[in-house]
């Protein structure tokens, strides 16, 4: 505290003089501490905020097994909570919607749709069985006076479960906030058991809304972490998408509003959206004609609330102050607290059992020894005299008792009615004490093996309450959706070549392309320079524009062919290059040194690396014998944009004419499948599928026994039930073993997958109910091991079948042959390792050596040097 807040003394008395600024400081600190400790932040021991704790205490106080009006619960809670009925009612509805501690009756609203609950007078509540089992125990609860001193309330409830992590919590205090994610009930129990076994847990959230989530940056729930949550979107058909689960922290209404907003802005293009949500979420999105469903799914994740980012911030109250802990550390603390509470309960139970045996022993001795008939006992005139007499009578029995006899114990003996004394049954008393001793042995055993007892406690909770609490949120890894790749073309781009302007407002000038308002444009100019800029209404980029197009970052397949005259030497050069990535609004020189007078003579943009043949016409010169010759761009290597190029001629070029269009000089596109992301990529992640070009297709085989063909477009989405994904080969032979549902037979067949329309799903096993695909292999040496029961005697026998040798290739729709005419018990498949020549696996980008500023794939044609090109030109002359 600063000096101006220190007390000052005078002659009469001592007073504390606090300036106004000191008062504000004290008041603010008091207020901030109160909000943090008593309003917004949950306690680590029971995972509850004060209002939630008071609601639970009030429900327990009113609990008689029947439902109570929510309004009555709110009114009773106000004895403990001084902040009004609204805050109590809102907190109780939120707790009820989490479906763990409170049984609800009536309309409690729906957090998925955002519908609010009915008024408290119309809804009812009671404690759930789980809450009664886990939350309360008056013997282990520490109490305090309520705010008005009229009632007792718990400081914390003796919760024997990681309730905070199960329910989650969110609150804003003064200069402090907390955001704890909800976690899965079953996973929390399993993780708690692992903690008891001495292992460190690793838990991730689970949201009641379902959906998919990427927890790779969760950071154990601490500050700085981030969770990406996505809606679950399925493709009903090529014109319809269905959203069946929404991200946590959103509602169906907010998701629909965000989709409509994105449609209005031109980011996506939909025909209609319908909300068919009832017991389950169902938002139907009908696409506009000609719109790709795969691209639209990515666009929904990029531009709408179908994907949200959540930043956790796990702050709790521990040791009467706020602390930031990871969720794993909180679980460890909760597990230790549960173990201590269980220990305390066992100790209390042990004490109660010992007290019962103690008093039963006193009563038995008192009656068997006839102490109640002793003249001194009968003639005693007051309680103190009775105690003295009984002390003397019990003197010889005291060593056998587990504790000292107190006056209160004698009072209980004295208070026994004579009728119970005369009817006392020694045999029953001995039997009772024997049973109590057995119980004591059990309790002491639990105390000796407390960890095993705690594990059994968690296991009982799991067995009793885990039904219906399986994980709802699918754990996935998401790739980053590049907005520019999925945004629809919502603006038209124009340019004025002479004036050097480009933009969407130049509607009277030359049309370039349809594009998105978040796209970037690459512009090439006649002086041999290029620049990349963002789409705008009108932007000056420099005069003499020769080419402009939408720019795609990291595009290695778009190759630019250019011939230019160097302004310094007058020499003409030819080059092929790609622009992979540059800084926006920075001008780059593509010529030799960027000297004044440099001019582009010929330029083409080739989206797939095409290389044309051009005819060069030179101006007449006394030293030239041949004024025309052909140049094939396929003979020029593709290099970085900064390369000078190969010399065409040292003499002036009169004109350049396209002689013939070329074909692509690039090899096929190397594609991998990333199983964790369920997406294709060209970055070397996952399983290598091969080189794709032209009409090549991808084969997808599903676990249900169906297949479909798809293109190798990187925007494609793949289902989670894939059994096989590979490059489609219409001549490749497969073998399949299925269980046929109608005949109850095991069938085997060999076949090839036939060409189908892209996106069409076709079954290659029986579509009868209960039919199931057991095995699928393309291994020619595969063997099936079949265990059968043969004949009437049901003799066990094992058959081995080499599939390729015994079964002919049939159509994919054929059911196939029976594995055996006998009763099949078990089928297994053995696939010997096929020995093949080791093919060179293509290197990914990280493995490739960097070459120049823009490393790209080289063509298959021979690379010629500048000197070789010059020699060729001179010879042709």
Image (cartoon, rainbow, N blue to C red):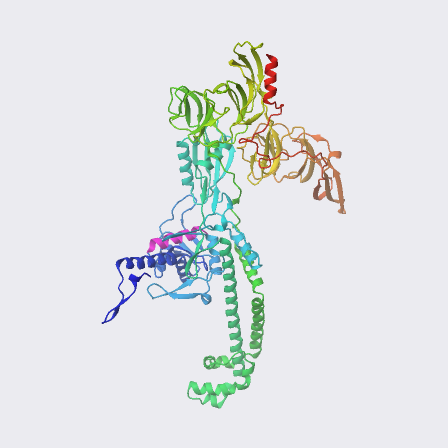
In this rendered view, identify the residue nearer to me: 526 or 55: 526
Total marks placed? 0
One can see residue 633 in this view: yes
Q: Position of residue 29 (x, y in %)?
A: 34, 58
Q: Position of residue 500 (x, y in %)?
A: 40, 22
What kind of secondary structure does the magenta stretch mostly adopt? helix
Quarter of the figure with the C terminus:
top right
In this rendered view, identify the residue nearer to me: 525 or 807: 525
Q: Quadrant of residue 631?
A: top right
Up-down relation of residue 344 to residue 357 (above or below) = above
Judged from this view, the residue extending furthest toward the left is 12
Q: Is residue 845 magenta?
A: no
Q: Is residue 91 magenta?
A: yes
In this rendered view, identify the residue nearer to me: 313 or 802: 313
In this rendered view, identify the residue nearer to me: 805 or 367: 805
One can see residue 659 in this view: no
Task: Please report the residue visible at 57 percent of the width from the left and 59 percent of the height from the top.
Answer: 198
Up-down relation of residue 701 to residue 367 (above or below) = above
Up-down relation of residue 11 to residue 509 (above or below) = below
The region drawn magenta spans 84-100
Q: Position of residue 820 (x, y in %)?
A: 73, 39
Q: Quadrant of residue 834?
A: top right
Quarter of the figure with the N terminus:
bottom left
Task: Please report the residue visible at 49 percent of the width from the left and 44 percent of the height from the top.
Answer: 210
Please indicate whether residue 228 sits to the left or right of residue 451 in the image.
left
Q: Position of residue 222 (x, y in %)?
A: 47, 51
């Amino acid at each position: 505290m600063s000096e101006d807040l220190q007390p000052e003394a005078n002659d009469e008395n001592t007073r504390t003089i606090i300036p106004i600024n000191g008062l504000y400081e004290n008041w603010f600190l008091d207020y901030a501490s109160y909000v943090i400790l008593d309003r917004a932040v949950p306690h680590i021991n029971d995972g509850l905020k004060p209002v939630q704790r008071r609601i639970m205490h009030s429900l327990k106080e009113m609990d008689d097994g029947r439902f109570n009006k929510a309004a009555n619960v709110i009114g009773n809670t106000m004895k403990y909570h001084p902040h009004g009925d609204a805050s109590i009612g809102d907190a109780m509805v939120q707790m009820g919607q989490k479906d763990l501690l409170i049984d609800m009756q009536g309309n409690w609203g729906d957090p998925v749709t955002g519908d609010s609950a009915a008024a408290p007078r119309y809804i009812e509540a009671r404690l759930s069985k789980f809450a009664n089992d886990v939350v309360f125990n008056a013997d282990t609860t520490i109490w305090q006076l309520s705010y008005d001193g009229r009632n007792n309330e718990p400081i914390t409830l003796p919760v024997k479960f990681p309730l905070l992590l199960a329910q989650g919590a969110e609150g804003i205090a003064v200069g402090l906030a907390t955001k704890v994610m909800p976690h899965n009930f079953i996973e929390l129990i399993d993780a708690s058991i692992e903690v008891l076994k001495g292992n460190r847990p690793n838990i991730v959230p689970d949201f009641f809304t379902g959906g998919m989530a990427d927890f790779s940056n969760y950071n154990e729930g601490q500050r700085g972490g981030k969770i990406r949550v996505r809606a679950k979107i399925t493709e009903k058909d090529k014109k319809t998408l269905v959203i069946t689960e929404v991200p946590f922290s959103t509602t169906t209404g907010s998701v629909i509003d965000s989709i409509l907003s994105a449609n209005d802005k031109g980011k996506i293009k939909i025909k209609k959206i319908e909300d068919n949500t009832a017991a389950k979420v169902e938002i139907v999105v009908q696409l506009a004609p000609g719109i790709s469903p795969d691209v639209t799914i990515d666009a929904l994740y990029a531009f709408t609330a179908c994907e949200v980012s959540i930043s956790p911030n796990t702050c709790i109250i521990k040791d009467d102050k706020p602390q930031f802990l990871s969720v794993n550390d909180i679980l460890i603390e909760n597990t230790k607290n549960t173990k201590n509470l269980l220990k305390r309960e066992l100790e209390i139970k042990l004490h109660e059992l010992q007290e019962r045996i103690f008093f039963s022993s006193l009563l038995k001795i008192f009656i068997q020894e006839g102490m109640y008939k002793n003249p001194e006992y009968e003639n005693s005139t007051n309680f103190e005299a009775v105690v003295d007499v009984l002390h003397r009578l019990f003197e010889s029995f005291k060593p056998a008792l587990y504790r000292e006899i107190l006056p209160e114990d004698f009072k209980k003996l004295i208070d026994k009615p004579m009728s119970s004394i005369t009817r006392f049954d020694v045999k029953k008393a001995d039997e009772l004490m024997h049973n109590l001793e057995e119980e004591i042995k059990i309790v002491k055993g639990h105390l000796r093996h407390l960890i095993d007892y705690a594990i059994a406690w968690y296991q009982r909770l799991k067995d009793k309450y885990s039904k219906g609490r399986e994980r709802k949120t699918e754990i996935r890894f998401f790739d980053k959706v590049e907005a520019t790749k999925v945004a629809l073309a919502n603006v038209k781009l124009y340019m004025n070549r002479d004036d050097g302007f480009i933009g969407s407002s130049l509607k009277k000038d030359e049309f370039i392309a349809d594009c998105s308002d978040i796209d970037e444009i690459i512009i090439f100019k006649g002086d041999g320079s290029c620049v990349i800029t963002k789409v705008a209404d009108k932007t000056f980029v420099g005069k003499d524009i020769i080419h402009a197009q939408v720019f795609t970052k990291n595009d290695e397949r778009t190759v630019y062919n250019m011939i230019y005259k160097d302004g310094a030497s007058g020499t003409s050069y030819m080059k092929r290059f790609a622009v992979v990535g540059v800084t926006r609004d920075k001008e780059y020189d593509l010529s030799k040194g960027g000297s004044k007078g440099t001019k582009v003579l010929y330029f083409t943009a080739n989206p797939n690396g095409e290389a044309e043949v051009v005819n060069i016409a030179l101006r007449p010169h006394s030293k030239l014998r041949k004024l025309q010759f052909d140049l094939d761009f396929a003979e020029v290597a593709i290099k970085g944009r900064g390369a000078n190029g190969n010399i065409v001629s040292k003499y002036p070029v009169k004109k350049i004419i396209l002689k013939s269009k070329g074909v692509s000089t690039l090899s096929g596109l190397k594609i991998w499948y990333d199983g964790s992301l369920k997406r294709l990529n060209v970055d070397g992640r996952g399983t290598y599928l091969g080189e794709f070009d032209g009409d090549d297709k991808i084969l997808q085989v599903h676990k249900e026994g169906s297949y479909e063909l798809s293109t190798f477009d990187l925007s494609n989405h793949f289902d989670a039930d894939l059994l096989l994904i590979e490059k489609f080969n219409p001549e490749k032979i497969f073998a399949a073993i299925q269980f046929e549902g109608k005949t109850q037979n095991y069938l085997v067949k060999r076949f090839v997958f036939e060409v189908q329309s892209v996106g069409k799903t076709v079954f290659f096993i029986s579509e009868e109910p209960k039919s199931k695909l057991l095995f699928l292999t393309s291994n020619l040496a595969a063997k099936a091991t079949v265990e059968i029961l043969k004949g009437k005697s049901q003799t066990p026998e094992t058959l081995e079948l080499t599939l390729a040798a015994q079964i002919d290739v049939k159509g994919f729709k054929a059911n196939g042959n029976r594995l055996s005419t006998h009763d099949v018990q078990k089928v297994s498949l053995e696939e010997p390792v096929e020995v093949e020549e080791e093919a060179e696996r293509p290197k990914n980008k990280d493995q490739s050596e960097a070459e120049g500023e823009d490393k790209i794939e080289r063509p298959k044609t021979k690379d010629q040097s500048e000197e070789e090109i010059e020699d060729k030109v001179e010879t042709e002359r």
